[in-house]
Amino acid sequence: MFRARRYFAALALTTAALGATAALAAPAQAAGATARVVGGIVIIQGTTGNDSIDVVQSGNSVRISSVLHSVTSGGAPCVQLGAVVSCPATQLSVQARMGSGDDVVRVSSTTIDTTLIGNDGVDRLSGGSDRDFLDGGPGNDFLSGNAGVDSAQGGTGVDSCTAETEVNCES
Ligand SMILES: [Ca+2]
Ligand SMILES: [Ca+2]
Ligand SMILES: [Ca+2]
């Protein structure tokens, strides 16, 4: 990691004359989230730090992106489209495993079920228009199922939930 950082720091210095965009270009293998399909499930793996993930259905694809860091495709049938990973919307479901840190997951306009797992930290999980299962885990979480018949499980901490079924939610 340190070696890579030194390399990119040096690269940034040597390419400074080319402008800031060259220095900001992130390598494909940068630490960030990944998305891949396993057994018909689109699995989004967050980082151990803070994540902010958007899951948007666009036609026949589910597009995964982040405003905080890179999202990298784990391979077919998902493809890398610049900063976005596109997976077929024909999959059975989407599962986001966010790891520790304060994580945000926003799902919009999906016609497939999702499972959003916040793990440790103060997480904000927002489901789409279909059925969502939101699992806040430890920490004070904000869980919102939106449309559809949704389940929210706050876990430990003081959790705020809006869903048809709420478990371990304080408000
Ligand atoms: Ca995380
Ligand atoms: Ca919690
Ligand atoms: Ca929903």
Image (spheres, rainbow, N blue to C red):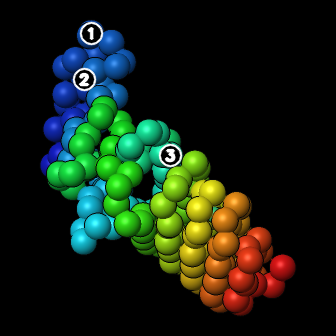
Picture disc at residue 59:
none
Residue drawn at 49 percent across, 50 percent down:
55
Residue drawn at 59 percent across, 68 percent down:
131
Q: x, y (%) of residue 22?
A: 28, 21
Q: CA distance from mark 2 to mark 1?
A: 8 Å
The answer to whether any part of residue 134 appears in the image is yes
Q: x, y (%) of residue 46?
A: 40, 62
Q: Which residue is mark 3?
A: 56
Q: Is residue 124 above or below residue 149?
A: above
Q: Residues within 10 Å of mark 1 (few under 14, many from 20)?
A: few
Q: Residues within 10 Å of mark 2 (few under 14, many from 20)?
A: few
Q: Nearer the viewer, residue 54 or 119?
A: 54
Q: Quarter of the image holding residue 98?
A: bottom left
Q: x, y (%) of residue 130?
A: 59, 62
For label 2, the SS is helix
Q: Is residue 138 above or below residue 103?
A: below
Q: Which residue is mark 2?
A: 13
Q: Tell which circle, 3 or 1, labels the residue nearer the N-terminal end.
A: 1
Q: Is residue 11 above or below residue 16?
A: below
Task: Tell me: 100 left or right of 18.
Answer: right
3 vs 1, front mark = 3
For label 1, the SS is helix
Pointers 2 and 1 in contact (CB under 8 A)?
no
Q: Nearer the viewer, residue 132 or 71?
A: 132
